[in-house]
Every structure is written in C-alpha cells, then in structure tokens.
Amino acid sequence: MKNKGIVVLGVSVDADEGAYQRFITDHGVDFTTIRDADQKSNNLYGTFKFPETYIIDRNGIVRRKFIGAVDWTEPEIVDFLSKI
C-alpha cells in the first residue's frame, strides 16, 4: 500500500546490535527499521508483547494496535488501512 502513502517502520528493542543486524539479514527485512536498545518505545506505547503493530495516522494519532502476528492480506485489515 506504499502508493497510498502507507509507511512501515520496524522498531527493534534488541540490546545486542549484532543480533539485530543478523535478524534483518536472515529474514530479508526490506523496510526501514530502527533499533531502540534502551526500549524507550515500550514505555511510550505500552508495548508488552512482541510483535506489536501500531497504526499511526498522518497526524500522529494511534488509530489501532495489533498484538501478535497479523495477516496483512485479510480483507478487514486491507479495508481498514485503505480508509486511513
């Protein structure tokens, strides 16, 4: 959905830089990622289980939170994303 202005940003809370880099390489991650080794994002967003996904609109408002793995091809989710 890049053509609709949707951006994916992965945030890793790995303390170990090498583990973070290995994961990115081993899993062929092809979107922008950052490493939050101090885990400040956990407190900021209330993250407690991984993975968690936050849908944040253009105004910085969290519109939805998914806990656990998500099938991004499910019609309900595609519909939701197309409307933000």
Image (cartoon, grey):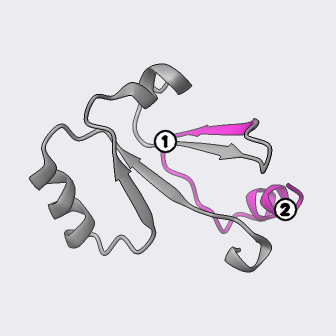
* Range drawn in magenta: 62-84
Quarter of the image with the C terminus in it: bottom right
Relative vertical location of residue 29 with respect to residue 20 in this rendering, above or below? below
69 and 4: which is toward the camera:
4
Quarter of the image with the N terminus in it: bottom right
- Binning the other alpha carbons within 10 Å of mark 1 as few (below 14), some (14 to 19) or many (20 upward) gives few
Q: Residue furthest front?
A: 59
Q: Position of residue 10 (x, y in %)?
A: 44, 54
Whichever of callouts 1 and 2 sits on the residue coming sooner in the sequence is 1
Q: Position of residue 31 (x, y in %)?
A: 45, 69
| x 28%, y 29%: residue | 38
| x 40%, y 75%: residue | 30
Question: Which residue lies under the disc numbered 2?
Answer: 79
Going by the numbered disc 1, the residue's amino acid type is Gly
SS of the residue under disc 2: helix
Q: Position of residue 46 (x, y in %)?
A: 52, 21
Q: Position of residue 11 (x, y in %)?
A: 41, 47
- Binning the other alpha carbons within 10 Å of mark 2 as few (below 14), some (14 to 19) or many (20 upward) gives few
SS of the residue under disc 1: loop
50 and 45: which is toward the camera:
45
Asked whether residue 33 appears in the rendered view, the answer is yes
Task: Tell me if label 1 and label 2 are in contact, CB under 8 Å.
Answer: no
Between the residue at mark 1 and the residue at mark 2, the CA separation in whole angstroms equals 20 Å
Asked whether residue 48 appears in the rendered view, the answer is no
**In terms of image quadrants, where is residue 29?**
bottom left
Q: Which mark is residue 68?
A: 1
| x 52%, y 23%: residue | 44
Q: How many marks?
A: 2
